[in-house]
Amino acid sequence: MAIDYSQLIPNNVDLAGDRRLQRALENWQPRFLDWWKGMGPDGTLNFDVYLRTAISAEANGWANFGYVKMPDYRWGIFLAGRNPNRVIAYGDNKGKPAWQEVPGELRSTLRRLIVTQGDTEPASVEQQRLLGKTAPSLYDLRNLFQVNVEEGRHLWAMVYLLHAYFGRDGREEAEALLERHSGDPDKPRILGAFNEQTPDWLSFFMFTYFTDRDGKYQLASLAESGFDPLARSCRFMLIEEAHHMFVGESGVQRIVQRTCDLMKEHKTDDARALGAIDLPTIQKYLNFHCSVSLDLFGQEASTNAANYYTMGVKGRYLETRIEDDHVLTDATFDIDTTDNGRIVRKTVPALQALNERLRQDYLEDCARGLLRWNKAIEQAGIDFELKLPHRAFHRRIGAFSELHVSPDGKVMSEADWKANESKWLPTDEDRAYVTSLMGPGVVETGKFAHCIAPPARGINGQPADFEYVRFN
Ligand code: BYC
């Protein structure tokens, strides 16, 4: 179904055919806009931004570019097309038709998953609220805003599900999604990583590389849900998510490139003396964002995850492409966990290991970008390699949270760990240095901050020096 833009809330779910739902969402809309104005990108209401807007959920319609003032962005409700023959691919309900309504016994489980997912979307916008002030270029500023409006739309996607399928509880949860705030001591966001700060652009690129990639894997698992409207919402969100990870990967790449170029040109290892971000600091930021994002996958052995799977509400990454029985009652899986203060490999029932399996898929994906970043370092003839930290490093959730582990996987005492922490994670001084390179924002077309290389190409075939944002 094409998207109807003549309506207050653009959608491809025939909102006009359900007046009650339409009215409820039209009631929520001004609250969302108030939240955007109060908690979204600071001081940007009048900017014209070269954004892509979805005009249909089809392959040729979801990326329509033009200048938009962000509060006028057409946030809407778009589900990927429905396959009327879709069956549930796994668990106890394997082979049964996908649910078009919420089965009563799964109501609270599904609501919880949708709320957890929904909560991350506005959280990330809040975390990135001040970054526009220090953007390294108009190109980067535009990419930040694109990510922000799409996270806003992903919130809409979850709020639609809550309103359409969960009655009064759902409406209350939709309100609460605008009431919790990132880092708020009284009403924090649900998951840890979404209460951390994103104070500078290296953090932003690492966040979009690592944390948005968790989004990709969680959304891909929910795209396998037996609850078809959730699956279809997530499938459409995944299309947008790809750009966010591109922003992260290419952003880090450009910082690494610039550092290497300057070091090579000036024949020195002292990147900071050149006004660049030194590679050891980049590694520390990487360690931080990777470890915080690993926490988002939950416990290594999780009965919650087993239940989600058995019930058919959350599958594995690319479930239908895996060749096994998709029931997993007799299968096992090897996971790293702890035993008596040591890291050990244990064979556990595959059903319990689903969080860990997803984390494994995720880490393999994370490693791919590092290959590209390291290539740039190698080509510059610099003897340094960026590495993913060990999965037990700096964890707050799961079995490893009780251990102190170095980035290369050595278990140590708390005192030893603390003594080395400043080598592994950004210190206040590192953060202050990175922040000092950021401001004020670069607002001339075609100009880039000193510490970052220009992109290889612009957005939507435009040149890198295109006027991506007009300030008015
Ligand atoms: N922080 O059995 P476990 C994105 C809790 S990012 C705090 O392992 P489960 C995005 C857990 O709730 C993707 N608490 O849990 C990216 C449970 O509590 P109870 C977001 C945590 O449920 C960038 C207990 O610990 N989507 O889209 O198997 C920008 C036991 O744990 C955490 C989703 O997360 C934590 N990190 O796994 C914008 C998908 N981890 O039951 C957007 C939906 C666990 O003891 N969520 N706990 O009270 C889920 O699938 C699952 O809830 C989780 C946790 C994977 C998060």
Image (spheres, rainbow, N blue to C red):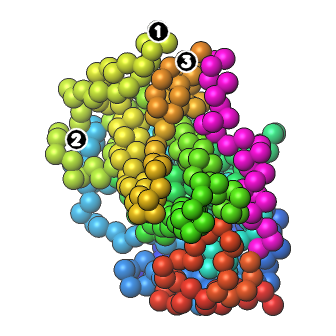
Q: x, y (%) of residue 302? A: 43, 28
Q: Position of residue 1 (x, y in %)?
A: 41, 81
Can the viewer see residue 1 in this picture?
A: yes
Q: Residues within 10 Å of mark 2 (few under 14, many from 20)?
A: some
- CA gap between label 2 and label 3 equals 39 Å
- Front position in the image: 223 or 246: 246
205 or 281, nearer to the observer: 281
Q: Residue at x 21, y 47 (%)?
A: 322
Instruction: Name the residue located 33 percent from the left edge and 21 percent from the top edge.
Output: 345
Residue tagged 2 = 326
Is the C-beta of the residue carrying label 1 under 8 Å from the nearest atom of ligand 1?
no
Q: Which residues are magenta?
A: 414-441
State how far apart marks 2 and 1 are (Cα).
33 Å
Q: Residues within 10 Å of mark 1 (few under 14, many from 20)?
A: few
Q: Classify 341 as above or below 124.
A: above
- Identify the element where label 3 is drawn: strand
Q: Earlier in the sequence, mark 2 or mark 3?
A: 2
Q: Is residue 346 above or below residue 191?
A: above
Query: Furthest-top residue in view?
Result: 340
Q: Nearer the viewer, residue 238 or 4?
A: 238
Q: Is residue 430 magenta?
A: yes
Choose top left, top right, bottom left or bottom right for residue 347: top left
| Amino acid residing under circle 2 | His
Instruction: Say what amino acid the circle numbered 1 marks.
Output: Asn
**Residue 64 visible here:** no
Residue linked to disc 3: 412
**Would you name the residue on which mark 1 appears?**
340
Please say whether residue 314 is one of the residues in the magenta stretch.
Answer: no
> Tag 3: residue type?
Met
